[in-house]
């Protein structure tokens, strides 16, 4: 089955109820695996690809190569859940530090040191202690004009005076070292 065709079929219907009779048996099995691995990834974003691979191999009895192909296709169709997990952790850290600042503020004078420490961590975590990266002027960047040439002087190399004679001489010198072996080719009948 053409990988691109299967991905195109699944793109809009991965989690939608639809008439699965339009799919052949292999495609239905593939769809089950895709749904399963994505749901498992959502439930536990810290699962590694190796564990997901092992799950697919054990649960569906597929080869390692097929399991990795399935993981790759799920990433293409639905994105990388681990990136979403990382964003969630960032959000959690930010909210926790904000709460720590609020708690320290409510402690009054005794919480000032805690509040400063939490605010410092919040600022460093969000890289506020660093300058913002400057935006590159992509529209102003002009690619270098490159023209192919056969002139060796461009590289600072002296051209050969008699090229054909030099080629013939090198051919004669190394001709004895070249071994060409003919063999019969038989196509697999499988």
Image (cartoon, rainbow, N blue to C red):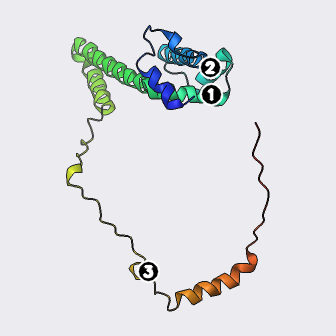
- Where 145 sits versus 83, above or below? below
Q: Are marks 3 and 2 in contact (CB under 8 Å)?
A: no
Mark closest to the chain's N terminus, 3 or 1: 1
Identify the residue at horizontal 22%, vertical 45% (top origin).
135
Mark closest to the chain's N terminus, 3 or 2: 2
Label 2 environment density (alpha carbons within 10 Å; few <14, some 14–19, many ≥20): many
In the picture, measured across the screen, residue 105 lies left or right of residue 35, that is left
Q: Is residue 137 visible?
A: no
In the picture, measured across the screen, residue 163 lies left or right of residue 81, that is right
Residue 154: numbered disc? none
Identify the residue at horizontal 57%, vertical 28% (top origin).
1
Q: Quadrant of residue 167?
A: bottom right
| The one of 1 and 31 positioned closer to us in this rendering | 1
Q: Position of residue 49 (x, y in %)?
A: 56, 27
Tag 2 secondary structure: helix
Give the labeled residue for mark 3. Answer: 152
Residue 56: numbered disc? 2
Identify the residue at horizontal 27%, vertical 41% (top origin).
130
Label 1 environment density (alpha carbons within 10 Å; few <14, some 14–19, many ≥20): some
The C terminus is located in which quarter? top right
Identify the residue at horizontal 43%, vertical 22% (top origin).
11
Q: Nearer the viewer, mark 1 or mark 2?
A: 1
Q: Quadrant of residue 32?
A: top right
Q: Are marks 1 and 2 in contact (CB under 8 Å)?
A: yes
Q: Position of residue 8 (x, y in %)?
A: 45, 26
Q: Position of residue 63 (x, y in %)?
A: 68, 26
Give the labeled residue for mark 1. Answer: 66
């Amino acid at each position: 089955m053409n990988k691109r065709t299967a991905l195109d079929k699944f793109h809009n219907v991965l989690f939608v109820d639809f008439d699965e009779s339009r799919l052949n048996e292999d495609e239905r099995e593939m769809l089950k695996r895709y749904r399963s691995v994505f749901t498992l990834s959502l439930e536990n974003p810290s699962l590694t690809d190796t564990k997901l691979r092992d799950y697919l191999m054990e649960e569906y009895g597929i080869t390692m190569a097929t399991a990795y192909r399935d993981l790759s296709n799920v990433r293409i169709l639905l994105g990388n859940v681990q990136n979403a997990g990382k964003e969630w952790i960032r959000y959690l850290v930010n909210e926790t530090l904000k709460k720590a600042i609020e708690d320290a503020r409510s402690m009054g004078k005794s919480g000032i040191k805690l509040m400063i420490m939490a605010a410092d961590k919040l600022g460093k975590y969000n890289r506020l202690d660093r300058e913002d990266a400057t935006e590159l002027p992509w529209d102003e960047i002009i690619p270098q004009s490159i023209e192919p040439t056969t002139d060796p002087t461009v590289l600072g190399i002296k051209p050969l005076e008699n090229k054909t004679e030099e080629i013939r001489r090198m051919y004669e010198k190394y001709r004895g070292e070249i071994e060409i072996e003919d063999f019969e080719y038989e196509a697999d009948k499988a």
